[in-house]
Image (cartoon, rainbow, N blue to C red):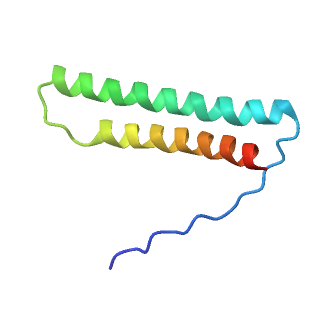
């Protein structure tokens, strides 16, 4: 049985404090960077061990993309707000 995709729902964050905005965006950037680094490590390990791709690198790259998209969504909503 397939799971229906979830509809986006709003999350209200108080970002009027510049430090709160900084914490959120820095955390998302750091997470994206860390996930990309992990993906690179997975690819290098797979090549070094001459093993087939097990999908881990793609998984971490997807997480990085999600973090980047979340940051872009925050920026867009602030610009529109």
How many numbered discs sit on the rendered protein? 0
Q: Specify the quadrant that holds the N terminus.
A: bottom left
Of 49 and 24, nearer the camera is 24
Say if 50 sits above or below 56 in the image: above
Residue 79's image quarter?
top right
Q: Outermost residue toward the bottom?
A: 1
The answer to whether 58 appears left or right of 28 in the picture is left
The residue at the point 79 percent across, 50 percent down is: 81
Say if 18 sits above or below 58 in the image: above
Q: Outermost residue toward the right?
A: 17
The answer to whether 64 appears left or right of 40 in the picture is right
Q: Position of residue 28 (x, y in %)?
A: 61, 35
Of 74 and 1, nearer the camera is 74
Residue 47's image quarter?
top left
Say if 52 sits above or below 11 in the image: above
Q: Position of residue 57 (x, y in %)?
A: 31, 36
The residue at the point 71 percent across, 48 percent down is: 77
The residue at the point 34 percent across, 75 percent down is: 2
Of 41 and 29, nearer the camera is 29
The residue at the point 64 percent across, 32 percent down is: 27
Of 51 and 28, nearer the camera is 28
Q: Position of residue 20 (x, y in %)?
A: 81, 36
Q: Position of residue 29 (x, y in %)?
A: 59, 30
């Amino acid at each position: 049985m397939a799971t229906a995709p979830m509809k986006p729902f709003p999350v209200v964050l108080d970002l009027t404090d510049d430090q709160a905005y900084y914490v959120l965006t820095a955390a998302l950037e750091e997470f994206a960077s860390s996930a990309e680094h992990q993906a690179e490590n997975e690819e290098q390990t797979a090549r070094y061990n001459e093993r087939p791709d097990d999908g881990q690198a793609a998984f971490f790259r997807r997480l990085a993309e999600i973090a980047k998209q979340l940051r872009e969504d925050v920026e867009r909503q602030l610009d529109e707000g």
